[in-house]
Image (cartoon, rainbow, N blue to C red):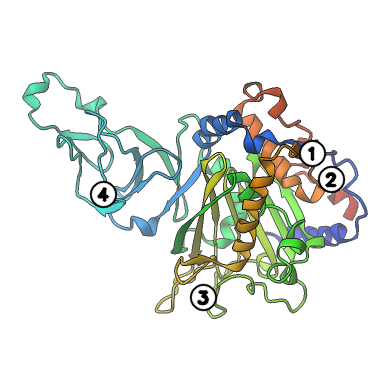
Amino acid sequence: MDEREIANLRKLMEYEANRTAPPSGFPNLPDLPGGRYTDPRFYELEQQHIWRKSWLLASHIDEIPEPGCFRLWETAGQPVLIVHADSGAINAFYNTCSHRGASIVTEIAGQRPRLVCRYHGWTYNHDGELLAVRNPEDFGDLDFSCRGLRAVRCERFGNLIFVNFDDHAPSLIDWLGPIAKEWEEFQFDKCRLAARHSFAVNCNWKIAMEANTEVYHVRSIHPKTVSPILDDRRNVNTFYPNGHGRMVAPSPKGADRYGAVNLPHDIAEIETVGEIARTCTQSYGIFPNWVSPLSARALPPLLFWPTSINTCQLETWTFAPDWGDNPKPDMWTENDGEKLVQVLLEDTEFGVWIQKSVESYGFRGVPLSYQEARIYHWNQFADRMIGIENIPPELRVEQVIGDEWIYPNDPRLACIE
């Protein structure tokens, strides 16, 4: 961030602390329909559109560090084979042989000079090209050029590997938009993978995710973990294109900003990280399922994946500068994935109670406050991605947050100048 952006954020923090109402012109937010959390029709629309058209974090280069290394990724419900090619490129394919549809690999990870189907021995290179078939004389004029593995779009942001199932989706850099520029200071191209773990949570995936996209609940759910280290009244929310969002909340003077998580104080830091991320919680929501505070010590995304309409999987990742001979940093778990740190337990355990309530006869919808507007912004974009006309009228959200509130626009700035 440049000096002007930092100065504006500091002024906006004081504006937020002193306001007595939402900003002038900010729209009243209609209730989110309750069925967006419980209706099988909406869940199916999410599966067809949101998960098929979004860029999804699938791997890190440390998991496939050398040519020939591969990793099987099925978290989004499709069998995807991610391969480090001899050329240095990172490719992704459906783990489906072009012959009879058998799985090319059945191991989670490994390293092979060629990709050979176990069923009948069809052989592919790391770029997915068909090289050889057993008993070629039995196939007549088999055209190898159109029998390669079917590719899945795969792009990198630094050392992070993303996939997208939609051939017509924008590029990853266009998907991130202005956030890609903001993230330059965090050096994603140099971060290493320190930890990656997965936990089952018994609630709708959006319930689990939304607990990490607003600070309205902090004083109630996190009175001893987050509340002492985050000034929720000075939190500044920003809406970005494509459903993304950011929150920046300063820490009270003298507070230990890392006191709520399992992160050593003596680990290496990312020297290029700026003032805001060093003195505030600077957290991003990347549509559809990434939430992460970014700091000089760690880049630790939380990813939320649906496993059914009322269950989900929480993935905890920690990226960090090289830690040398010291223990690997892991921001979100204790004892290398044995259990979640307390702050995440507070959210996930209460999420189970929320799930019970939203399935009751008494749940109709969600009236969101201005502080929770990032949730509404996410839902607006979700409907546009699904196609508003595809959504039953009683499950739609009204498109009330206009472009005048989307970065780089911000009507609040007129109030602080």
Residue highlighted by disc 1 = 404
Label disc, if present, on residue 86 of the rendered structure = 4
Residue 308: x and y in percent read 52, 40
Residue highlighted by disc 2 = 411
Closer to the camera in the image, 78 or 348 = 348
Residue highlighted by disc 3 = 268
Amino acid type at image mark 3? Ala
Q: Do the residues under discs 2 and 3 have CB atoms within 8 angstroms? A: no
Quarter containing the N terminus: bottom right
Label disc, if present, on residue 265 of the rendered structure = none
Q: Which circle, 3 or 4, is nearer the viewer?
A: 3
Closer to the camera in the image, 379 or 404 = 379
Q: What element carries label 2?
A: loop
User: How many residues crowd around disc 1 within 10 Å: few (fewer than 14), some, or many (20 or more)?
Assistant: few
Q: Do the residues under discs 1 and 2 have CB atoms within 8 angstroms? A: yes
Q: In which quarter of the image is residue 117?
A: top left
Q: What element carries label 3?
A: loop
Q: How far apart are marks 4 and 1 (CA)?
A: 47 Å
Q: Earlier in the sequence, mark 3 or mark 4?
A: 4
Q: What element carries label 1?
A: helix
User: How many residues crowd around disc 4 within 10 Å: few (fewer than 14), some, or many (20 or more)?
Assistant: some
